[in-house]
Image: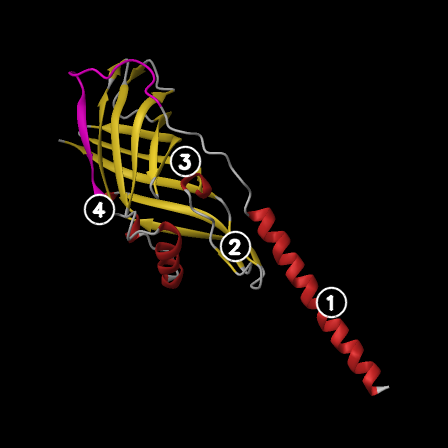
Amino acid sequence: MKRYRWMIGIGIVLVIIVAGVSYMVYSAGTVDSPHTPTGVATACGTAIPSTGLRTFQIVPDQTTASYGVHENLILRNLPSNNAIGTTHAVQGSFHLRTGASPLVAGMQITVDLSTLQTNEPQRDHFVRQNYLETDTYPNATFTSTCVQGLPANYSEGQVVRFQIIGNLTLHGKTNKEVFDLQGKVAGKTVTGTATATVYMTDFGIQPPNLANIAIAENKVVITMIFTAKEG
């Protein structure tokens, strides 16, 4: 009888293990959904004029670039955990014209990925070394090709919403991405927020997966809250 109970106990343990592994494999498959890269963006709209534009420079101390990615932490039972990484190491510039036929053009933004930090230093080191590979690809760069949705006229202090289309280069690969931007001009200062949704696999990065226990989604939300000064 004791031997019989012992065999039943082993059987129950095996069932639990198989069920747990099956669940983790299923969860990994559902979190890491595939995506097709968009390819490189080409110039659109009218040519950028050589005169009549004001130039603005990003102010790093007043600018934050961040990423947000959903993590499925199976063993912690925290399916809705979001990892947020931020940095102030942002440089860049853009040109704009206000008044009639407003224009935003020539945006060039560079973010130092090696400085991104979340609330877990071990995660940051693991992601930098094994996924972003910042020793080889330290920066992400965005170069605009055109804008869509600007109003016919712009008055100073007016908050506008539009889209900036361009090429994002990350991890040695370049793809077209679209940023939704909200911003305003006040004197010699531009403030705003730009947001885009990108996919790791589009840039040759496999979503972090620690033994099917901690699994990151393929989808990443990129946000830049910025201040730029004329000059």
Mark 1: which amino acid?
A: Val
Q: Name which quarter of the figure residue 155 lies in.
A: top left
Residue 196: image tag: 3
Mark 1 touching mark 3, by CB under 8 A?
no
Which callout, 1 or 3, points at the residue further toward the start of the chain?
1
Q: Main secondary structure of the magenta part?
A: loop
Is residue 44 or residue 222 the one in the foreground? 44
Which callout, 2 or 3, points at the residue further toward the start of the chain?
3
Which callout, 2 or 4, points at the residue further toward the start of the chain?
4
Mark 2 touching mark 1, by CB under 8 A?
no
Q: Position of residue 9 (x, y in %)?
A: 76, 77
Mark 2 touching mark 4, by CB under 8 A?
no
Is residue 191 or residue 46 the one in the foreground? 46
Mark 2: which amino acid?
A: Ile
Residue 61: image tag: 4
Residue that lies at the very extreme toward the left in this rendered image: 231
For discs 1 and 3, the disc positioned in front in the rendered view: 1
User: Helix, strand, or loop for circle 4?
Assistant: helix
Q: Position of residue 203 (x, y in %)?
A: 40, 41
For discs 2 and 4, the disc positioned in front in the rendered view: 2
User: Helix, strand, or loop for circle 2?
Assistant: strand
Label 2 to label 3: alpha-carbon separation:
22 Å
Mark 2 touching mark 3, by CB under 8 A?
no
How many other residues sit within 10 Å of disc 2, few (<14), some (14-19) or many (≥20)? many
Which residue matches tag 2? 215
Report if residue 53 lies within the magenta region. yes
Which residue matches tag 1? 15
Is residue 224 or residue 201 the one in the foreground? 201
Which callout, 1 or 4, points at the residue further toward the start of the chain?
1
Label 2 to label 4: alpha-carbon separation:
33 Å
User: Helix, strand, or loop for circle 1?
Assistant: helix
Residue for point 38% across, 20% down: 149
